[in-house]
Image (cartoon, helix red, strand yellow):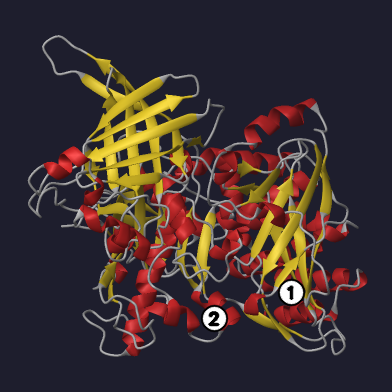
Amino acid sequence: MSIPSEEPRIAEEHGQGVLDPMSAHSESAQEQALPPLPPWHCVRLGPVSGRYQGYQSTSRTSFLDCRVDIDPRGVNSPVTNRVSGDFHEVFTIQLPGRPPIIWRRYRESWIIDAPRATWSRCEVTITGEVRFWKGTHPMTQTRIRIPWGTFAPAGPAEITFTENGGVARTYHCPRTSVNFREMTLEVDVCNSVNVTPLMPAYHTHAHSNRPANVPARTVTVESAYQEAGIGLTLNTPAHTIFDDANNTFSTWSAPELHDAMETAFSQFSGGWPRWSMWGFMAGSFDNSGVAGIMFDAAAAFGGAGEAPERQGFALFRKHSWFNNLPSGSPANDTEAAALRDFLYTYVHEAGHAFNFLHSWDKGRPDSLSWMNYPWRYDLRNGTDTFWNRFMFRFDDQELIHMRHGDMASVIMGGDAWASGGHLEQPQAGEAFSVMEGLAPVELLLRAEPPVYDLMERVTVEARLRNLLNVPMEIDTNLDPAYGSMSVFVQRPDGRVHHFEPIMSVIAIPETATLQSTTMATTGEDRHSHEIDLTYGRSGFMFTDPGTYRIRATYHGPGGIVAISNVLTVRVLTPASRQDEVQAAEYFTDQVGLNIALGGSASPHLSKGLETLTEIAQRHKDRLVGARAAEILTGVYGRAFNRVTDYQRGTFSQVARAEPQRAIELTQPAVELYRNSPDRRLNLAYHNLVSRRADLLAAADDSEQAQRELRELYDTLEQRKVRPSVLEQIRMRQEKA
């Protein structure tokens, strides 16, 4: 229970200095002459904050979903002092002899950034100016009156919108929830890791390294989001168990995980987008350092194999972080740390479903949030400082986005941030900002020559180089999916897009030490990585002929930030009418997902695989075909396992590895790379020969593998590639 006359004090304690309360003593003289009211008069049950939903008073064709956030919902749930809402259009069909069929269509969202609340004993009145996320609207003021009775909850709310000019609309909205939004989460489990605990439950005082003032409580995935204002419901307490005991199966690939997600969501009826997410507890990923993956895209909008983006994530129970997970309460700090990491990984990966970026991508590298990396924070602020300061919550800006952001930018399957009003955008100025002074590390983007055919995969070389006279530790995995690299692309129409990969990965950092510039003699002061920018969360990035400008930011250990040069590349017009026709087949989500996943044998993406195979064969003498052929090594180079019966949890191998076919399909590509003077193909040539060496070994042709590695060494030596790279090739040749 809460007493209204105490609202000013509560608001002040929570930093909400904008409230304009009225005490019970400010009543009119006539009211003061009446007998005094009993002290329990209008004692309210619970907070005012929460969700209010209802129809327009004069018409049931308009529906309002309103979120009021002006007083504490609980001890661990900060107040953001915002009011927001969504308008929906209502449709009704009346069939003879049956109840009416009613459904709604979302129209738009709005927010009041600085609401003014006036408290009295039995009600609160909130006023403020409405800001719509999209479109052009007349200036609109809102007045919200929320009364309450004695020992009763707040509501219903009377909400009036008045446009400049006098047009007014009023909605009658009962209070429906203490939460601002609701969502469901289904978690399925592989049989190999079907052990306790399946879901984390961590007590905030379990580990000795914690904030002195952190409230003592048990935090679960559900409670972490409930404190953030989201009512999260586990959809099925009885998890679907997948039998992954196949003797030929050891680790999950990205295509297999994506296929499992598509299959899982094909079981659910109903339209998209919707407040629903799927989690998957698996054994190990191909890269053993990966603890969790969030999938941010799928085939397209529609149904099975055509679901929208931001819908599923996977955790890998056999990751080293979880080796010491206790089945019950942790007995020591080691077990407590494992359980804490388990909870953190769950909440972090699910957070991406709300369109959350990592903290450093938003210019907040020191944020104490679920969306930061503890080790990144520690490198900037000192060893073990993250967990010593972390209060097990999202930061303030994330809470505002999650509770009050444009619904289309928050809901699973809604718009990517680049498509509309979004609180979670990366720093806009980062794309083409200027670095002053001498940075400790140089980030160079290269593509020589910087020209690509339409439908050619667009990859660039990202090179880090130590500029200091002392050794420097770097993160070697520059794939944007791992979080250390942010890439921005300015398209020919002038718009700047933040390239976001379809997967967001949380993993143990892969680091290396770059020698100082003065000590390095054979290139040990630099590191290169090929980045594929062809397809990301918002689709294909290079779809039109014209000039593109690319820039990247590197976020390294110890808070090191490096901004790259601006790389200008050009995409050519189609070479023929036939190319124009094929481009329509190429620029589809199924092709794009095959590229982003490194090739997939999933039936959900079979059309895309057919298109890539056709391009590889038809254009085998061009880079368009060669770059497509590279993707095919991921399809035929390994077996493919998938969920064949979701209800029974059947998981089986559906395609065997065909290394010989992958070798044949990429033979023209390796010859083209070897004979081309194009320096930007050095990394592609190196990577393809390395993959082919594995394929040739699987096909029992080690002699050919050694021959191709030797040719690679000789070719790159003539091109004056640095000695450290040549040494890697020589060592690989000896092992082949």
Q: Residue at x 42, y 53 (%)?
A: 18
Q: Amino acid at mark 2?
A: Asp
Between 264 and 658, the residue placed more toward the observer is 264
Q: Residue at x 36, y 62 (%)?
A: 12
Q: Residue at x 79, y 48 (%)?
A: 549
Q: Helix, strand, or loop for circle 1?
A: helix
Q: Which residue is mark 1?
A: 706
Q: For label 1, count other residues whose C-alpha is less than 10 Å away and answer few (under 14), some (14-19) or many (20+).
A: many
Give the quadrant of the N terminus.
Answer: bottom left
Coordinates of residue 315 in the picture (x, y in percent) = 40, 65
Q: Taking the image as drawn, is residue 338 in sight?
A: yes
Q: Quadrant of residue 7?
A: bottom left
Q: Residue at x 75, y 31 (%)?
A: 579
Q: Is residue 348 left or right of residue 606?
A: left
Q: Helix, strand, or loop for circle 2?
A: helix
Distance of label 1 from label 2 (alpha carbons): 44 Å
Between 2 and 488, the residue placed more toward the observer is 2
Give the quadrant of the C terminus.
Answer: bottom right
Q: Is residue 150 left or right of residue 538?
A: left
Query: In the image, is residue 697 above or below residue 83?
Result: below
Residue at the top extreme of this rendering: 96
